[in-house]
Image (cartoon, rainbow, N blue to C red):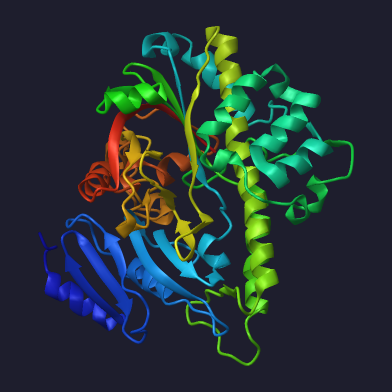
Amino acid sequence: MQPKNMQRLMRALSREGLDIQFNNNTYSVRLQDEPDAPMAEVLMPSDFVVEAKAFKQLANLAAVRHPGGGCVCRACATPDFHPGNSGVAIGSVVETEGQVIPAAIGTDINCGMRLHVADLGVERFLAQRDRFVEAMKGDYFFGTRDVTMQAKATRALYAHGIPGWLDAMIDAPMGSVAYSDFDQLAKEADRVYLGGSMAGHWRWAPQELVPESGLVRDGEMATVGGGNHFVEVQTVESVLDRQSAYQLGVKEGQLAFMIHSGSRHVGQYIGGMWRDYARKAWPAGLKYPTAQLFPLSVQANPELVRDYLEAEATAANYAFVNRLLLAELLRLRLREIYGDIEAPLVYDLPHNITLPEGAGWVIRKGACPAFAGQPVIIPGSMGTSSYLLIGQGNDNLLNSASHGAGRSKSRFEMTRAGADHREDAMGLTGVDCIALRSERRFEEAPAAYKPIQPVIDAQVAAGSVQVVAKLRPLLTFKV
C-alpha cells in the first residue's frame, strides 16, 4: 500500500534534491546530483510520516566518499528512522569499502541494550517497590554507588572491555561489586555481543581516568545518561517463540530489567576528538563535503583509520562495562531487598558502532546487529511494550534491526510553552517514571515516540527478526 498523497510527497522530496521511489513498504532514496552513490533503502510502514530531513541525511551519508579512495557500497535504514541532531539520521546503516566515517557514529559510541530476567513475580516486587526505588535512586541519581577500582582495572577495561576488567577486579575486588558473583559475570560474557571486548587502548581515554597507579573514581561510570537512555523494570507479558525463550532462560511472568546506556563522557571525549581529527585530515585545498561528514581513507590515511577504530573500540569497551555495572548495582539491590535473586543476563548488544563486515565495515547509527540466531532487544517507550527477538539475518537490511520505536516529536516540542501536558495527552497515564528532573517525564513521554507495534511488524514481515517475547513496563528510571 502506498502512502497517501504519494505524488505530492515525491514532488516535495524532489525539491529537496532527492531522487526517491516507493515499493512494498520500502523507500529508495539518493541525492539527485550523486548518481553514482548507492540507493539507500528505508524500510518504513506506509502510514508513517515521511520526514524530508531524515531522508536527506541518509542520502548524504550514502554519498560520502573520500577523494583518496573509499566509498559507501550500500545503505539502508530501519523503521524507527528519524532525523539526528548531528547530521546523521537515527536508524541509518551503511556498508563502506576503504573508509570509515567517525561522524556517522558520533559521540554516543556503543549506546546499547542489556536485558536480565528474574524469577520474581510482579506482586512480590511491588510489595517492596518503594524500598527498591529509593535504593536505586541513591545508586543511579545521588552517587551512593561505589565503583572505585584500581588503575590496573581501569586500563584493562579500556583495552579489553569486560574480560579485561573482570580479570583485574578478581585480583582486587572493591566497591559495590566486591559483593558480586564474579563466576556468574564471567560466564555471562558469552551473552554479550563480541564477548563485550574490542581491541581498544587506554591511551585514548581521558588522561585523568587512566593514571599509572592508585585508585580511580569515575563519576560517570555506572550512570544511565540523559536523552532516551533508561533503566526499566518490566514483566514478561507473553512468550511467542517458546523454544528460543527456553534457550534464553525467559518465561512468562518473570520480572525483566532492561538497560539502555552507552559510553557516557568517554564517548563524548573520543567521538568529539575524532570528529575534529577527520576534519583536519581532509585533503588541503579540496572543498569540504556538503554534509560535513568527513571520512578517513584506508588508502590515504591508513594510520588514522587504524587509530580511529582503536579509539572507538576503547569507548565501546567502556560502554560494555558501564551497562554491566548498571545491571550489577540493580542485582545487588534485588538480593538485598528480595533475597537470593539470580537475575541472569539474557543478552547485551550495541548500537552506534563500526564493525568489520561485508566489503569493509558496517556502520550502524541507532541500529543493532540482527544476524541469524542472534538475540535482538527493541524497546518501546516507557508506556508501551518492548520486545525480545531473534535476528533472521536479512542481508538486504545489512543484517540490522531498529533500536527502538523512533521519535516522532522533538524534546522541545514536548516541553515548549503551550504544549498539552495533561497526563493522558502525553501518554503518561499509569506510567511509573522515576526521574531526576521532572521535565524528563515530558521529554521522554510515550507521545513523543512512534508506535512500537508497526516498527516490529515491518521488520518481522521483512524477514529481519522474529519475536520471542513481549515485555510490559512497570517502572522506568530516567536521569
Along the horizontal axis of the image, is 195 left or right of 48? right
Q: Position of residue 424 (x, y in %)?
A: 27, 36
Quarter of the picture holding the N terminus? bottom left
In the foreground, 81 or 71: 71
Q: Position of residue 343 (x, y in %)?
A: 50, 19
Is 32 located above or below residue 247 in the figure? below
Residue 23 in which image quadrant: bottom left
Residue at the extreme right: 213
Along the horizontal axis of the image, is 64 left or right of 161? left
Q: Which residue is at 50% across, 44% downward?
A: 112
In the foreground, 181 or 455: 181
In the foreground, 187 or 101: 187
- The mark total stands at 0
Along the horizontal axis of the image, is 59 left or right of 21? right
Q: Which residue is at 70% across, 22% downward?
A: 176
Is 35 located above or below residue 387 in the figure? below
Residue 383 in which image quadrant: top left
Residue at the extreme front: 359
Q: Position of residue 358 (x, y in %)?
A: 44, 61
Quarter of the picture holding the C terminus? top right
Is 296 located above or below residue 477 in the figure? below
Q: Which residue is at 77% across, 32% downward?
A: 168
Q: Position of residue 363 (x, y in %)?
A: 48, 60
Q: Which residue is at 31% across, 44% downward?
A: 392
Is 43 located above or below residue 165 in the figure? below
Residue 114 visible? The answer is: no
Along the horizontal axis of the image, is 477 left or right of 6? right
Residue 62 visible? The answer is: yes
